[in-house]
Amino acid sequence: MSELDNFVKIVKKIGISSLQEFIGEDKVATYANIGLSIDSNNLSVALFFEKGILAFKDFNFRERVFFSRKNPNKIQKSICKFTWKPGQEAEKYFDFIGFPYEYISFSEEKKKKHLTNLLEKSKSLHDYQKWMKFKMLSFLNSKNKRVIVHMPTGSGKTRVTMELILDYIRTSEPSNKVIVWMAHSEELCEQACETISYLWDDAGYGKLNLIKLWGGVKIEKFDFISTNFIVSSFQTAFSIIKSQDSKKFRLFADISKRNNLLIIDEAHQSVAETYSQAISLFSNLNTKLIGLTATPGRSNTIETNKLKRFYNNNLISITDHNGKTLNNKAMNYLQQKGILSKVKRVVWKGSSLNLSDKEILAITTELSDLPKNVLSKVGKDQKRNLIILENTLYLIKREKKKCILFAPSKDASNLLAMLLRMKDIRAASITSDMDNVSRSFLIKEFKENKLDILCNYGVLTTGFDVPSINCVIVARPTTSVVLYSQMIGRGMRGKSMGGTEDCLVVDVEDNIKDYPNLREQFVYFNKFYQ
């Protein structure tokens, strides 16, 4: 029985009234108004999408579940009182209610188990990838210190860069190099670790000291004797900067002093204040810096020029099999080679956004995307939600599409998933508020084709690879070319890269104002580097 099934089986026994209390009466009223049957089974699923396993952090909730069991003993009620962390007290409680304890106390490795390695050792790089690696290696052998590498999502930038790192290690001195890979999500960090481990085992270069620095991992000391590959999140690095722990800071300063090469995944984030400080933490005057991105720009001209200066106006863009830079022919070339899927785009009617002067000012002067209150307003448009529901049902039932849906808000993501489930669609919702264990479980279910669609808000734009996705529904309005290209990129992995031949990109109508077309996504920022 799955984690979700177990959760529903146990939690539904607390009854409709209690479930309404923990979900929120306003949200339950929204479900009812749009036609969802308000029963304990549906509300238990809704609560899982809303809070995941973290619902059990609430003592009142734990107590309510405790008393819903057969023959609860009031004397035993004390087992509900435990600190939210692994231990005998927590284990005793979950054993009593019949919920598998491993769903609560996953180790880091178990949490990450869902991440599938997409590499095949038997497959060499494509010719265009070999050219990209050659250009990056030329950069490493030059006097230049920084470069940003521009490759579309799905074209293999992680694989190419890892192959570059292997060549760099075996062709240069000293042997005890330090290489740091930085990314902004746990998924991207784990992807980097999986890829280097996979290739390193095949290459057989001796010992690799792989150090994982994210998600609260504690390291007492570093061994710099062999080749050192360090993977860290920006969040971890920034927490070190703010930390008062001098011992911990000295450890990171030691990495900085020795660091030969720093890789920045999703490099368009580099100039954000917290990110640039984190990059400084891991680099010295001699550190080579390579930024990887599918979109070498920011939300507007000022920010994009700042990013350009950060990388010394040095851009390596994708080439064909002869090493010729493709520019506006890149998308056609990659689709013809089966690297990217061929995209069909359709439009569904959405909301008519009437922005206030204040909201317009926020977008134009504060360098922001649509404000959250506007996105929330869009997500509450029930006519829009029903249009999305009706059309998504057709895509899944009639056209057998495997879909990822980007919703405008957390509530909209949960609501759409619940409505789809009501129509016998295997749907789930993931949001940035969901705990890692629950999120990992649902991603695993999706990858194993136990779900037809994954609705999400605030996550899954980067570091998320499910090659079988053949439909992307962009129901989240955005003015950001970067964000839009990341969303559609989730379904653009072509057949020769383990993906699909075709991908349907659905734009809800309120997404298409002032957008470049699909092929312009790739060359949109190139003018800044000329």
Image (cartoon, rainbow, N blue to C red):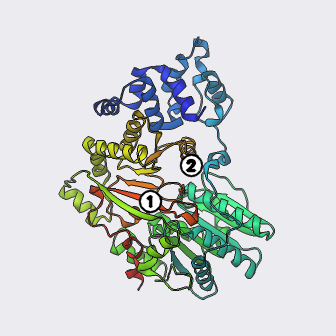
**Which callout, 1 or 2, points at the residue further toward the start of the chain?**
2
User: Which x, y percent locates residue 446?
Assistant: 53, 46
Residue 247 in sight here: no
Q: Quadrant of the N terminus?
A: top right
Q: With respect to residue 20, does 70 lie above or below?
A: above
Q: Report whether 61 appears left or right of 77.
A: left
The residue under label 2 is 447
Tell me if mark 2 has few (under 14), some (14-19) or many (20+) residues whose alpha carbon lies within 10 angstroms of its own.
some
Looking at the picture, tell me which residue is in the foreground, 394 or 421: 394
Q: With respect to residue 342, does 450 lie above or below?
A: above
> Residue 42 sits in which quadrant?
top left
Q: With respect to residue 333, does 384 lie above or below?
A: above
Residue at 51% from the left image edge and 63% from the top image edge:
493
User: Which x, y percent locates residue 151?
Assistant: 50, 73
Residue at 72% from the left image edge and 56% from the top image edge:
220
> Nearer the observer, disc 1 or disc 2?
1
Q: With respect to residue 346, does 392 lie above or below?
A: above
Secondary structure of the residue carrying numbered label 1? strand
Which residue in the rendered view is the most extreme toward the bottom?
143
The residue under label 1 is 503
Residue at 70% from the left image edge and 77% from the top image edge:
167
Question: Residue 412 shows which numbered tag?
Answer: none
Looking at the picture, tell me which residue is in the foreground, 201 or 90: 201
Tell me if mark 1 has few (under 14), some (14-19) or many (20+) residues whose alpha carbon lies within 10 angstroms of its own.
many
